[in-house]
Image (cartoon, helix red, strand yellow):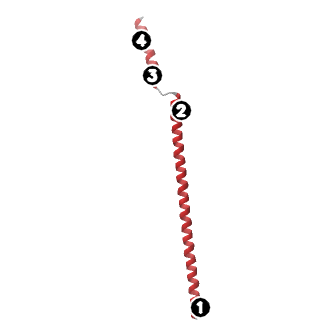
């Protein structure tokens, strides 16, 4: 009888020890929430980086277009001056 009671007591102790070893439900939920928040923060940072890159590309395209417009205007003025110079020589 003593042996049976001892075995039952040890089994109960082991069972409660195993159940108590794992994280609580609140800890699991907190870890999942932290992971989700981290993923959301990375996604937001990635989105911001993409928007900044798009803005830089748009600014570069605008600068390129402005440069081309200035070159075209300078060429046009040069051609007008050459045309006036040729007419003046005749």
- Count up the numbered dots: 4
Residue sitting at x 47%, y 26%: 22
Determine the residue positioned at 53% across, 39% down: 36
Toward the left, the furthest residue is: 3
Residue drawn at x 57%, y 83% as measured from the top left: 79
> In this rendering, which labeled residue sits more in front, label 1 or label 4?
1
The residue identified by callout 3 is: 18
**CA separation, marks 1 and 4?**
119 Å
x, y (%) of residue 64?
Answer: 54, 68
Pick the quarter of the image with the C terminus: bottom right
> Which residue is labeled 4 in the image?
7
Looking at the image, the residue that sits furthest to the bottom is 90
User: The residue tagged with tag 1: helix, strand or loop?
Assistant: helix
Number of other residues with Cα within 10 Å of mark 1, as a class: few under 14, some 14 to 19, many 20 or more: few
Distance in Å between CA atoms under marks 2 and 3: 20 Å
Give the image location of residue 14, x and y in percent: 43, 18
Secondary structure under tag 4 reads helix
Label 4 neighbour load within 10 Å: few <14, some 14-19, many 20+: few
Residue 87's disc is 1
Cβ atoms at labels 2 and 3 below 8 Å apart? no
Mark 1–mark 2 distance (CA, rounded to whole Å) = 86 Å
Give the alpha-carbon distance from disc 3 to disc 4, as whole Å. Answer: 16 Å
Residue 29 numbered tag: 2
Closer to the eye: label 2 or 4: 2
Q: Closer to us: mark 2 or mark 3?
A: 2
- Of the residues under marks 1 and 2, which one precedes in the sequence? 2
* Disc nearer the start of the sequence (1/4): 4
Q: Secondary structure at mark 3?
A: helix
Kindly state the secondary structure of the residue where label 2 is placed.
helix
Q: Residues within 10 Å of mark 3 (few under 14, many from 20)?
A: few
């Amino acid at each position: 009888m003593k042996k049976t009671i001892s075995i039952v007591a040890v089994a109960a102790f082991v069972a409660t020890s195993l159940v108590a070893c794992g994280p609580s439900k609140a800890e699991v939920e907190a870890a999942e929430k932290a992971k989700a928040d981290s993923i959301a923060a990375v996604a937001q940072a990635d989105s911001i980086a993409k928007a900044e890159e798009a803005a830089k590309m748009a600014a570069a395209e605008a600068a390129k277009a402005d440069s081309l417009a200035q070159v075209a205007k300078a060429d046009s003025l040069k051609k007008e001056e050459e045309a006036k110079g040729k007419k003046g020589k005749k």
